[in-house]
Image: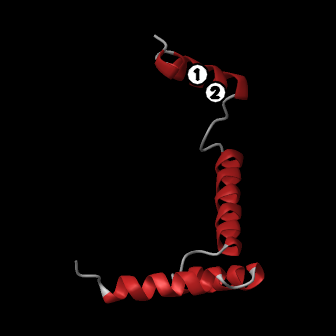
């Protein structure tokens, strides 16, 4: 059976990473995640703040209405109660 050299290399890197102390593994994971150019927590937090501010502005301008929480939860219960966990 043919073994892909990249898989062999990947396995070797993985095994070596596992041998690192936990703080160094955490650092390695952070570096690998950063290399993927994924949003970091600070960016995610900033985007949530922008979204919250946008929604507050919509409410203050009267562009959207508010629905009381008990109405929202009652609607959710009605929607998901039927057939939930195999119940009909």
| Most foreground residue, 32 or 1 | 1
Residue 77: percent from the left, percent from the top?
Answer: 59, 20
Q: Is residue 64 above or below residue 79?
A: below
Disc 1 element: helix
Residue 26: percent from the left, percent from the top?
Answer: 70, 79
* Residue at image location 64% in from the left, 66% down from the top: 47
Which residue is under mark 1?
Answer: 75
Q: Are marks 2 and 1 in contact (CB under 8 Å)?
A: yes
Q: Is residue 52 left or right of residue 4?
A: right
Asked which quadrant contains residue 30, the reply is bottom right
Q: Residues within 10 Å of mark 2 (few under 14, many from 20)?
A: few
Q: How is the image coloured?
A: secondary structure
Asked which quadrant contains residue 63, the reply is top right
Residue 82: percent from the left, percent from the top?
Answer: 49, 15
Q: Is residue 34 left or right of residue 45?
A: left
Q: Which mark is residue 72?
A: 2
- Residue furthest to the front in view is 1
């Amino acid at each position: 059976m043919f073994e892909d050299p990249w898989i062999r290399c990947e396995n070797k890197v993985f095994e070596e990473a596992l041998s690192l102390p936990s703080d160094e593994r955490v650092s390695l994971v952070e570096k690998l995640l950063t290399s993927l150019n994924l949003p970091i927590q600070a960016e995610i937090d900033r985007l949530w703040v922008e979204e919250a501010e946008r929604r507050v502005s919509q409410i203050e301008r009267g562009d959207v209405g508010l629905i009381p929480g008990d109405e929202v939860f009652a609607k959710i219960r009605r929607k998901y109660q039927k057939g939930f966990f195999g119940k009909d």
